[in-house]
Amino acid sequence: MEEKLPQEEGILYGVSVGPGDPELMTLKAARVIRQAQVLALPHEKKENCVAYQIVCQAVPEAEGKEILLIPMPMTKNPQILEKSHSEGARRIFAEMQKGKTVALLTLGDVSVYSTCWYLYRRVKEMGGRGSLISGVPSFCAAAARLDISLASGSQELHILPASYQIEEGLSLPGVKVLMKTGSRLGAVKKLLEEKGLPVQGVRRCGMEGEELYRSAGEIREDAGYYSLFIVGEKLILSEERERKEE
């Protein structure tokens, strides 16, 4: 009997799909998705996975791919998160051991508060091969949509996870980006209003239902998870907007 050679182990790609607009997904991300045998989605249902819906608009071939659903609970409980991340990583690694290329999709950029990173890191710790595919971060897309510059000259830029305490962070010089407000949106809005800070924001940037906010007072308390706010001592306007507002 002819001896079977061991199958080459697969590889995991952490693929950034951008902030929402399918046209902002990179050519490299599209190529990797086309070549992958398995798309891993950090969700319980592919129909509700925003990253997958973005990909299907940019890469129609994605709809015919094998799907691996990885439920990711929205909690800060470390025990629940550890169990979920470890189990998800084991399931991905099992597909890689079959010689399959797995593309793990994530919104925005894989290096910025990415759910994908928790799974990717564990797969690498198991000895799996992996590569990260960068993308357009949500705060860069939001700044472009608002027609402002995030930072200029010596101005500092700080990224703050608004689902935690941000009072100290708001006192930092320069521009502050508030991400992942989650259920604390009402408290964040109140804090910004009390401090009288100049703020602009975007809800569902590049997606259906997009809304722009030009002040803290305009922010809806039910704006939802996909909302991002930019706080600055002086937000830098484009020359065109400056002329319009004079």
Image (cartoon, grey):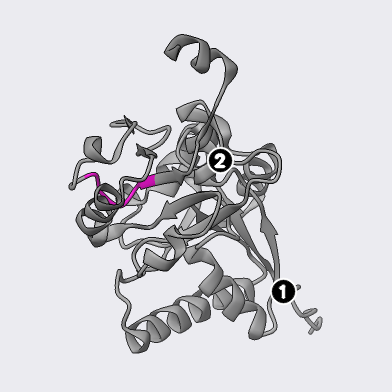
Q: Is residue 168 left or right of residue 65?
A: left
| Secondary structure state at the residue bearing disc 2 | helix
Tell me the residue at 50%/45% (across/down). Answer: 138
Q: Give percent across and percent down for residue 88.
A: 45, 76
Tell me the residue at 43%/45% (across/down). Answer: 231
Where is 151 relative to 189, above or below?
above
Q: Give percent across and percent down for residue 64.
A: 48, 44
Nearer to the camera, 202 or 149: 149
Nearer to the camera, 99 or 26: 26
The amino acid at mark 1 is Glu
Q: Nearer the viewer, mark 1 or mark 2?
A: 2
Label 1 or label 2, whichever comes before in sequence order = 1
Tell me the residue at 31%/52% (across/down). Answer: 195
Q: Give percent across and percent down for residue 124.
A: 66, 78
Q: Taken as a whole, is the magenta stretch helix, strand or loop?
A: loop
Pointer 2: what residue? 140
Label disc, if present, on residue 9 of the rendered structure: 1
Q: Is residue 225 magenta?
A: yes
Q: Residues within 10 Å of mark 2 (few under 14, many from 20)?
A: some
Nearer to the camera, 56 or 51: 51
Magenta range is 223-228
Q: Give percent across and percent down for residue 119.
A: 53, 73
Nearer to the camera, 7 or 90: 90
The amino acid at mark 2 is Cys
Indicate the quadrant containing the C terminus: top left, top right, bottom left or bottom right: top left
On the question of residue 99 being in view, the answer is yes
Indicate the quadrant containing the N terminus: top left, top right, bottom left or bottom right: bottom right
| Secondary structure state at the residue bearing disc 1 | loop
Kindly report the distance in space between the C-alpha atoms of the residues bearing marks 1 and 2: 36 Å
User: Where, by quadrant of the figure, is residue 5 drawn?
Assistant: bottom right
